[in-house]
């Protein structure tokens, strides 16, 4: 059985020079970090409404065992094995690449070695 804990709302948190806290009704986010945190809070609340905890637990119980990621890297015919991520956009900077074609980007990485 899967155990899921929800922690209580926290006071403001400082990350280097940025400070953020959970959403406050009627307030506006004070910086990009707070904007992202508040957006994610809303997104999670919406997801919880669409998929209640009990249904989520039932789904988790039916999921197959995850594949061994480390073993897959070790099976690589060439060393080192590489994991790459491509992004069309960033939450803080917006669109990074207009002509985003992940397959073409992956092929160019592969061709580049």
Image (spheres, rainbow, N blue to C red):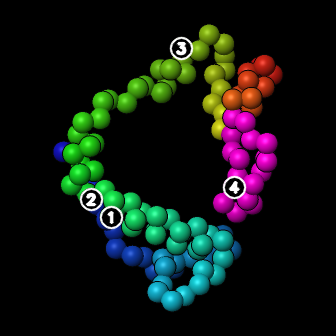
What secondary structure is marked by label 3?
loop
Q: Earlier in the sequence, mark 2 or mark 3?
A: 2
Q: Which of 16 and 5 is in front in this view?
A: 5
Q: Name the residue under label 3.
A: 75
Report the Cα–Cα distance between label 1 and label 2: 6 Å
Report the Cα–Cα distance between label 2 and label 3: 39 Å
Q: Is residue 32 rendered to the left or right of residue 73?
A: right
Residue under the point 42% across and 25% down:
68
CB within 8 Å, label 1 to label 2: yes
Q: What stretch is highlighted in magenta?
A: 86-102
> Which of the two marks, 3 or 4, is nearer to us in this view?
4
Give above or below for 77 relative to 90. above
Q: How crowded is mark 3: few (under 14 residues within 10 Å), some or many (20 or more)?
A: few
Residue 95, visible in the rendered structure: yes
Q: Quadrant of residue 63?
A: top left
Residue under the point 50% across and 20% down:
72
> Which of the two marks, 4 or 2, is nearer to us in this view?
2
Report the Cα–Cα distance between label 3 and label 1: 41 Å
Residue 52, disc: 2
Report the Cα–Cα distance between label 1 and label 4: 27 Å
Give above or below for 16 relative to 56. below
What secondary structure is marked by label 1?
helix
Q: Is residue 58 rendered to the left or right of residue 96?
A: left
Image coords of residue 66 (percent x, y): 37, 30
Q: Earlier in the sequence, mark 3 or mark 4?
A: 3
Q: Is residue 29 rendered to the left or right of residue 68?
A: right
Q: Which of marks 4 and 2 is nearer the N terminus?
A: 2
Q: Name the residue under label 1.
A: 49
Q: How crowded is mark 1: few (under 14 residues within 10 Å), some or many (20 or more)?
A: few
């Amino acid at each position: 059985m899967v155990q899921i804990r929800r922690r209580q709302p926290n006071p403001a948190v400082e990350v280097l020079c940025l400070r953020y806290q959970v959403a406050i009704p009627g307030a506006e986010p004070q910086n990009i970090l707070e904007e992202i945190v508040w957006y994610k809070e809303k997104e999670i609340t919406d997801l919880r409404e669409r998929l209640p905890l009990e249904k989520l637990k039932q789904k988790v119980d039916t999921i197959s065992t995850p594949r061994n990621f480390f073993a897959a890297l070790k099976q690589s015919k060439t060393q080192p094995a590489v994991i790459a991520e491509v992004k069309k956009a960033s939450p803080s900077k917006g669109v990074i690449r207009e002509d985003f074609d992940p397959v073409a980007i992956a092929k160019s990485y592969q061709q580049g070695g």
